């Protein structure tokens, strides 16, 4: 763990922040996680990312491959949830979940014929599935607050993964070169870009009357505006990261994707990123995580989704 990562302090009662899970709830959580990956892929237009228009900056990916990858991961999410039932965050649980995740990654890579569609999402969304399981899930009440789920997932992420491959990953090289935390620190700090970026932007856009697709684009932009995205850094360095952050902030300042000026700024951002052959894949994974957490929220009688205590 990076020396400067801030892990939530352990506290009693993790297992009691919701009810005990029953077997079917593991499948429901897995379906929510799978749907979040598919829904993220379908959000259009996303700057330089795979969407309904095409492959963006990804020559080895397509919408069909993203969908195939997501469906292949549903059994992995089921296994992650079942492994977490009745458990507390611990080194033993961390090791078990990591092994399940690595098996899931192999299944995904086979389904996509070697294309890395959702490696980061297995870690990010998988941890949240585990957190939601430990906190207790009830499809009628959502059984647990977003903050409790994210904090529980963070506690798991703070334990070391002794079974990790010895070979250095692209993400590890980027973290070392640029001094950023990446997906590991995002999880260890309790998913701040989900709780304080994606979810508030998503729900604020809905309250303004934006379409669901536009609200989801604004959630992505809110994440991009502050995220040190290792996918961008890996592909094109600081130029790509600076372009993504400034372009996302500009689009949001101009009213977001629901306004003509915001859409124009979004188009300019995409042109910049495509020119650099870079895409905000880390932000896309966190948008999927946002949609997963949002999908856990109960729907009120008036059909609107209430905000969590964030």
Image (cartoon, rainbow, N blue to C red):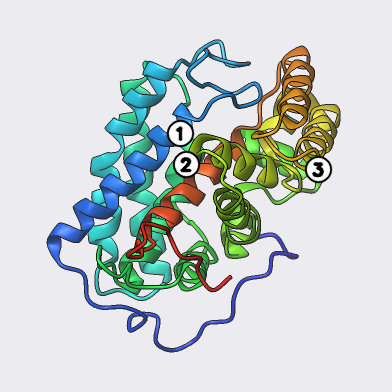
The structure residue drawn at horizontal position 73% and vertical position 65%, both measured from the top left corner, is 3
Quarter of the figure that contains the C terminus:
bottom right
Category of crowding for the residue at label 1, using alpha-carbon neighbours closer than 10 angstroms: few (below 14), some (14–19), many (at least 20): many
Q: Earlier in the sequence, mark 2 or mark 3?
A: 2
- Report the residue that reaches farthest toward the bottom: 12
Q: Earlier in the sequence, mark 3 or mark 1?
A: 1
Give 249 or 111, whichever is nearer the viewer: 249
- Do we see residue 209 in this rendering? yes
What residue would you read off at disc 1?
118
Residue 35: image quadrant is: top left
In this picture, residue 142 sits left or right of residue 238: left
What residue would you read off at disc 2?
121
- Do we see residue 102 in this rendering? no
C-alpha distance separating marks 3 and 1: 30 Å
Q: Nearer the viewer, mark 2 or mark 3?
A: 3
C-alpha distance separating marks 1 and 2: 5 Å
Give 292 or 253, whichever is nearer the viewer: 253
Q: Nearer the viewer, mark 3 or mark 1?
A: 3
Circle 1 sits in a helix, a strand or a loop, which is it? loop
The structure residue drawn at horizontal position 54% and vertical position 43%, both measured from the top left corner, is 287
Give 179 or 168, whichever is nearer the viewer: 179
Quarter of the figure that contains the N terminus:
bottom right
Circle 2 sits in a helix, a strand or a loop, which is it? helix
In this picture, residue 270 sits left or right of residue 26: right
The structure residue drawn at horizontal position 51% and vertical position 62%, both measured from the top left corner, is 157
- Report the residue that reaches farthest toward the left: 23
What residue would you read off at disc 3?
253
Residue 64 image offset from top left, x and y in percent: 37, 17
The structure residue drawn at horizontal position 69% and vertical position 38%, both measured from the top left corner, is 230
Residue 76 image offset from top left, x and y in percent: 28, 44
């Amino acid at each position: 763990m990076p020396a400067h990562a801030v892990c939530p302090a352990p506290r009693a009662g993790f297992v009691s922040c919701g009810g005990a899970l029953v077997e079917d709830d593991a499948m429901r959580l897995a379906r929510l996680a799978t749907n979040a990956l598919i829904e993220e892929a379908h959000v259009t237009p996303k700057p330089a990312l795979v969407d309904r228009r095409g492959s963006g900056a990804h020559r080895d990916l397509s919408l069909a491959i993203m969908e195939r990858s997501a469906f292949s991961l549903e059994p992995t999410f089921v296994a992650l949830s079942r492994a977490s039932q009745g458990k507390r965050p611990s080194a033993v649980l961390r090791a078990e979940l990591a092994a399940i995740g690595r098996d899931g990654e192999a299944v995904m890579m086979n389904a996509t014929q070697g294309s890395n569609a959702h490696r980061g999402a297995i870690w990010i969304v998988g941890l949240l599935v585990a957190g939601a399981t430990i906190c207790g899930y009830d499809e009628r009440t959502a059984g647990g607050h977003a903050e409790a789920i994210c904090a529980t997932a963070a506690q798991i992420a703070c334990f070391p993964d002794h079974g990790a491959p010895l070979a250095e990953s692209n993400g590890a090289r980027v973290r070392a070169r640029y001094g950023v935390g990446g997906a590991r620190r995002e999880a260890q700090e309790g998913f701040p870009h989900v709780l304080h970026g994606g979810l508030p932007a998503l729900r604020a856009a809905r309250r303004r009357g934006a379409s669901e697709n536009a609200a989801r684009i604004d959630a992505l932009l809110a994440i991009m505006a502050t995220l040190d995205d290792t996918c961008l850094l890996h592909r094109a360095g600081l130029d790509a990261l600076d372009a993504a952050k400034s372009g996302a902030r500009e689009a949001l300042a101009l009213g977001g994707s629901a306004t003509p000026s915001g859409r124009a700024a979004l188009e300019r951002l995409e042109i910049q990123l495509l020119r650099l052959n870079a895409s905000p894949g880390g932000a896309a994974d966190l948008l999927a995580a946002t949609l997963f957490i949002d999908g856990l929220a109960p729907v009120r009688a008036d059909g609107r989704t209430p905000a969590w205590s964030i």
